[in-house]
Image (cartoon, rainbow, N blue to C red):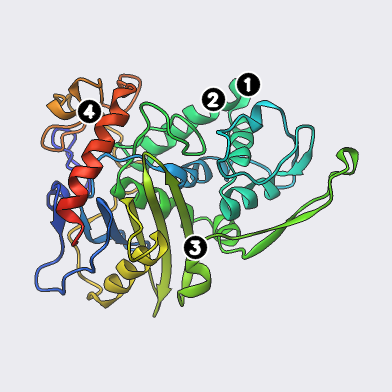
Amino acid sequence: PRADPAHPTVGGTALATPGLVTPAGVAAPPPVAATSWLVADLDSGAVLGGCDPHGYATPASVQKLLLAATMLPKLDPHQVVTVTAADLDIEPGSSAVGLLVGGRYPVETLWLGLLLRSGNDAANTLARLGGGPDGLPGGVRAMNEHARHLGALRTHAVTPSGLDAPGQFTSAYDLALIARACFADPTFRRYDATPRAVVPAQPALREKAFEIQNDNQLLYRYPGALGGKTGFTDLARHTYVGAAERHGRRLVATLLGAEVTEQRGWQQGAALLDWGFTLPRDASVGRLVRPGELTAPPSPAATPPALAAAGGPVDQGHRWAHPGAALVVVLAAAGVVLLARRRRHASVRRHR
């Protein structure tokens, strides 16, 4: 059934919790050092379990999945793009493919650089290209429009790469919606599972061709792995999306705000996937909404005290604030609030 616009608890009432939610009578999920996570079936859309599934968090580079979901259908993979200086305006020391100003690269190479090496230079170039006359800002605007189309009402992009910026946020549930859209695209699946690729030479710039490798260890170490995306910033900490197939069943795990203690992000994702595959096929605590399902504007909602000072669009009882033009962008103070929230929840839910 369609979500009730007056009370749109997205995905089901059981998901409206800041704590752990799993089907009755199943084994407990493994301990992961993430403040929020979710496991879902990519095909049926069933949500198998989660922890604070709708909780606000910062995405880091898993944001690149929203860029892919938005722009892959729009861009010609064979088009050759000339990189500009603005495309390379990224945070010093952050991940990059190694594109050169004036370099000419096929769009397909940019996608591979984005997904294999998490290239922020590739993210800027793709967003600019897909943004039309408005360039990169138009690309980010298109990302936010597509997030709303997918039902990811708790997602707002400010940078196409996921580099931290005031007012940027997502949730474990929203990431599952975005990942489901990505893995429905065979071109994305092919790019995302590519183990290595060659960035072509740039003779005019005296640059030789070089190889890049996929940094998602799930592909190499988890049987049936389909792909996913890694992420890290100082604010977001470790974020991860991983998908795998077993016995004809495709699951995705999303994690936000994870610390690396005994397990890296992909290992925490693998542990949650293992748990998900043990559950009966009819197990569910909710569902992933379908693209376009949440078309009616939700009723206005009050802003809880936690982010009121930051001007952030938060919900009360999971009645969503309108995600469209009326969206109030979280200001710089939101980053501080989210970081404090992550640290507070980490001590409470590290055992989950």
Q: Is residue 130 left or right of residue 221?
A: right
Dot 1 falls on a residue whose secondary structure is: helix
Mark seen at residue 227: 3
Q: Which element carries disc 3, helix, strand or loop?
A: strand
Whether residue 8 sits left or right of residue 200 in the image: it is: left
Identified by mark 2, the residue type is Gly
- Percent coordinates x, y for residue 15 in the rendering: 17, 50
Circle 1 residue: 133
User: Looking at the image, is mark 4 or mark 2 earlier in the sequence?
Assistant: 2
Task: Indicate left or right for 245 with 283 as reference.
Answer: right
* Number of numbered discs on residues: 4
Three-letter amino acid code of the residue under disc 4: Ala
What separation in Å lies between label 2 and label 3 (alpha carbons)?
Answer: 28 Å
Residue 118 vs residue 344, the one in the foreground: 344
Residue of label 4:
321
Q: Which residue is mark 2?
A: 138
Task: Point out the tag, 1 or 3, that comes first from the N-terminus.
Answer: 1
Give yes or no for contact between labels 1 and 2 (Cβ–Cβ under 8 Å): yes
Q: Is residue 130 above or below residue 64?
A: above
Mark 2 surroundings: few (<14), some (14-19) or many (≥20) residues within 10 A: some
Position above or below: 163 against 17: above
Hey, what amino acid is under mark 1? Pro
Q: CA distance from mark 1 to mark 4?
A: 30 Å
Residue 151 in the image, given as x and y percentages of width and height: 32, 41
Q: Is residue 200 visible?
A: yes
Q: Badge 4 local density, few (<14 within 10 Å), some, or many (20+)? A: many
Q: Quadrant of residue 297?
A: top left
Residue shown at 29% from the left, 27% from the top: 334
